[in-house]
């Protein structure tokens, strides 16, 4: 709980189970634009973006945080998915000037900036913290890491709606507005020195569980937790930051457009407030039940310092949002109430109005 509060206040740092893939070459951004769900062709140096790689039906296969430094596009993804991402990208190289590499010598630190601020301000503050200029005389600061240790800084656009995106959750204010997640890409051999310096400057080291609690409270989807082989970005409200509805053709675009235009995807993301009277909480993958039927599954679980035990779950879209559900727990069923993220109609903001009879909801 202490680590969560420190992270939330911008006074914590955590080493995350993430990995990095780089793309170099003059055609890198245009090439990534043709493959992914996001418009990144004109991405400016230092600007952050998020993209998805989809299958032909519009289901999520890969997700990556992208920042370009003018010569290299840095893609951050789950550690267990980085090799597959690099292999896929490498298989898609043809006659363009691009080179894909799995960056084994790059580590990822996570930190949080309270509230919402301009990306340039967040990057400047992060670089200043690493350089020591916010805590000591920069002219006399001495560190065991060189100026090249910092590869890139990615500022999460969540929960903003990026150009070309749309939102499903209409909550005002969105709970994600309380925090801005930041990924710092560092040379792996500099991590110990950087963390030692940050601790000396009053920045605490936090664990992944603390990071996860804040992510869940922000309704922020994560590839390794909330995505299965059937996941559509609409079900997770991921069109906010990772999908451009007006860009050119890419694999899965027809599925994305169809689900957005028709609405009513098969499932929806929900926040569950779990009964905290038991010291045990359900695990990711636990069944969510109602009326004697399984209606979904838990994808992420945490004990939040303010909300208590909470979980993200993917449930049937038609499940009544006002009913309490039961989650399979280690010691028996755990009661839970729902907080709506994606609405039961599955309609995104700005969805075109139907001109005739509406096709029945999508089926698997």
Image (spheres, rainbow, N blue to C red):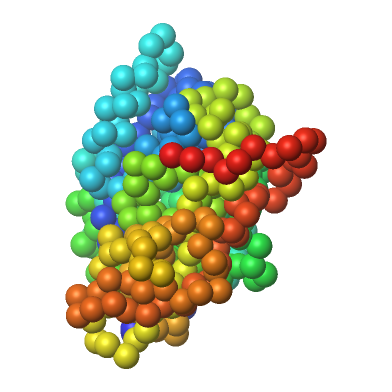
Which residue is pictured at 60% across the width and 34% down the height? 258
Q: Residue reaching furthest bottom?
A: 277
Q: Residue reaching furthest front?
A: 292
Which residue is pictured at 28% across the width and 64% down the height? 286
Which residue is pictured at 31% across the width and 27% down the height? 88
Which residue is pictured at 55% across the width and 63% down the height? 341
- In this rendering, would 26 be left or right of 309? right
Q: Residue reaching furthest top?
A: 95
- Residue 67 visible in the snapshot: no
Relative vertical location of residue 248 with respect to residue 7 in this rendering, above or below: above
The spot of residue 268 in percent (x, y) is 50, 56
Count the labels in the image: 0
Judging depth in this view, the residue of 209 and 180 nearest the camera is: 209
Q: Quadrant of residue 262?
A: top right
- In this rendering, would 43 be left or right of 90? right
**Quadrant containing the N terminus in the rendered view:** bottom left
**Quadrant containing the C terminus in the rendered view:** top left
- In this rendering, would 113 be left or right of 200? right
Judging depth in this view, the residue of 185 and 56 nearest the camera is: 56
The spot of residue 94 in percent (x, y) is 38, 11
Q: Quadrant of residue 333?
A: bottom left
Relative vertical location of residue 278 with respect to residue 171 in this rendering, above or below: below
- Residue 290 visible in the snapshot: yes
The spot of residue 237 in percent (x, y) is 54, 53
Relative vertical location of residue 208 with respect to residue 151 in this rendering, above or below: below
The spot of residue 190 in percent (x, y) is 24, 55
């Amino acid at each position: 709980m202490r680590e969560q509060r420190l992270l939330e206040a911008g006074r914590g740092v955590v080493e995350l189970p993430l990995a990095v893939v780089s793309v170099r070459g003059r055609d890198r951004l245009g090439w990534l634009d043709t493959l992914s769900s996001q418009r990144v062709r004109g991405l400016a140096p230092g600007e952050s973006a998020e993209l998805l790689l989809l299958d032909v039906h519009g289901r999520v296969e890969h997700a990556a945080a992208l920042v370009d430094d003018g010569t290299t596009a840095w893609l951050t993804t789950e550690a267990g998915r980085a090799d597959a991402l690099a292999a896929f990208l490498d298989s898609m190289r043809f006659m363009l000037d691009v080179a894909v590499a799995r960056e084994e010598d790059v580590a990822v630190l996570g930190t949080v900036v309270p509230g919402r601020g301009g990306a340039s301000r967040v990057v400047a503050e992060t670089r200043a913290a690493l350089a020591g200029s916010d805590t000591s005389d920069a002219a006399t600061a001495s560190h065991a890491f060189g100026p090249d240790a910092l590869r890139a800084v990615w500022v999460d656009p969540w929960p903003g709606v990026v150009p070309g995106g749309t939102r499903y959750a209409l909550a005002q204010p969105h709970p994600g507005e309380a925090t801005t997640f930041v990924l710092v890409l560092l040379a792996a051999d500099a991590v110990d020195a950087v963390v030692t310096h940050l601790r000396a400057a009053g920045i605490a080291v936090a664990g992944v569980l603390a990071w996860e609690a804040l992510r869940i409270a922000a309704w922020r989807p994560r590839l390794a937790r909330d995505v299965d082989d059937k996941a559509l970005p609409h079900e997770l409200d991921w069109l906010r930051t990772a999908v451009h509805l007006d860009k050119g053709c890419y694999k899965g675009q027809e599925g994305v457009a169809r689900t957005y235009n028709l609405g009513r995807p098969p499932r929806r993301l929900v926040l569950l407030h779990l009964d905290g009277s038991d010291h045990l909480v359900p695990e990711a993958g636990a069944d969510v039940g109602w009326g004697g039927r399984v209606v979904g599954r838990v994808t992420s679980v945490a004990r939040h310092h303010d909300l208590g035990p909470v979980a993200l779950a993917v449930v049937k879209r038609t499940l009544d949002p006002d009913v309490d559900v039961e989650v399979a727990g280690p010691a028996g069923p755990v009661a839970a109430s729902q907080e709506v993220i994606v609405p039961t109609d599955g309609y995104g903001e700005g969805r075109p109005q139907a001109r005739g009879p509406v096709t029945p909801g999508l089926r698997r």
